[in-house]
Image (cartoon, rainbow, N blue to C red):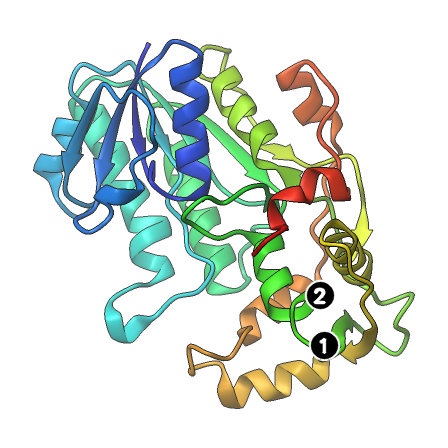
Amino acid sequence: MNVAIFGGTGFVGSNVTKALVDAGHNVSLLVREGSEHKVPDTTIWRSTSGDITDDDALDATLADCDAAIYSIGLLREFPSRGITFEKTQYEGVVRSAAAADRKGVSRFVLLSANGVRNPGTAYQETKLRAEQHLAASGLEAVILRPSVIFGDPGVNSEFATQLYEDMVASPLPAVGFFSGFSPSDGAPRMSPVHIDDVAAAVSAVLESAPGAKPLPLGGPDVLSWSEMIQCIAAAVGKRKLVVPMPIAAMKLAATLLDRIPAFPVTRDQLTMLAENNTADPATLEGLIGRPAKAFVPENLAYLKGR
């Protein structure tokens, strides 16, 4: 199958690209100027220079393809630089879906996110509106909603690497976020999902019948923030003191400081953290035909030496 990938040089997209090439598919990548060095070290059928605002580049990427995958997303927006959730996570999907329709590419796989909603944060709202637009587009839409994704990021970054760099590698105690009044009862919980499993799920849905509902992708563990920090510390041979921190207090600081790029979290990210991010692993395991990979030290070994 010939498959166009938008976002194929990012953390998720580069792993999806490798999985598809390994499965015998031909991959056509849209590569933004300056990201040529991020093209996966594998056999790529075709690459096109451009971005999601360039209709000619979109058409060239989709030419002669049977399916398209959209995996472009942001963890944080920078409006002063023109990098926004609206442009990247909604308008990019609208333009790419229109291009797929023009080029006769009927199957369109969207990498969305678990927990999207409206009203919600700008991140959540743009993801959900993109899902809704794609579902109404007339294309054979498949929408995947992974929980937080971990795995070797290569030249990119990902969830566990950021936690390691921001909290575990620091000589200071790590922060254990919680909502309400109790560090135990109010601890946010997540179902971290391994990038290999996400890539395998994308490959699996390329030729399966599209479902009417978005498919949640979660790993086998439901872990608190503190438990994830301790797993990361164990993976690099450390023990880490975790100090409870109310999310409300951190939100107050973020309200004042999250416009500063060096500040580690935004107010919206803290809002989403408080909502939890869990998903039953049964859907993922049904797609990939095997148990999902756990968030355990052996699967976090890529953090050693960082």
**Residue 113 at x, y percent in the picture:** 54, 45
Q: Are marks 1 and 2 in contact (CB under 8 Å)?
A: yes
Q: Would you identify the image quadrant in which residue 212 lies? A: top right
Q: Is residue 20 above or below residue 173?
A: above
Q: From the image, tell me which residue sits under label 2.
A: 274
Q: Residue at x 50, y 11 (%)?
A: 208
Q: In this rendering, would 102 be left or right of 222? A: left
**Residue 178 at x, y percent in the picture:** 79, 71
Q: Quadrant of the N terminus?
A: top left
Q: Residue at x 70, y 60 (%)?
A: 275
**Residue 281 at x, y percent in the picture:** 74, 31
List the single residue furthest toward the front.
305
Q: Secondary structure at mark 1?
A: helix
Of the numbered discs in the image, which one, if any, rests on residue 78? none
Amino acid marked by disc 2: Ala
Of the numbered discs in the image, which one, if any, rests on residue 247? 1
Q: Neighbour class for label 1 at 10 Å: few (<14), some, many (≥20)? A: many
- Front one among 75 and 10: 10
Q: Is residue 270 above or below residue 143?
A: below
- Residue 295: tell me if it is visible: no
Amino acid marked by disc 1: Ile
Q: CA distance from mark 1 to mark 2?
A: 7 Å
Q: Would you identify the image quadrant in which residue 241 lies? A: bottom right
Q: Is residue 61 above or below residue 265?
A: above
Q: Would you identify the image quadrant in which residue 17 lies? A: top left
**Residue 153 at x, y percent in the picture:** 49, 45
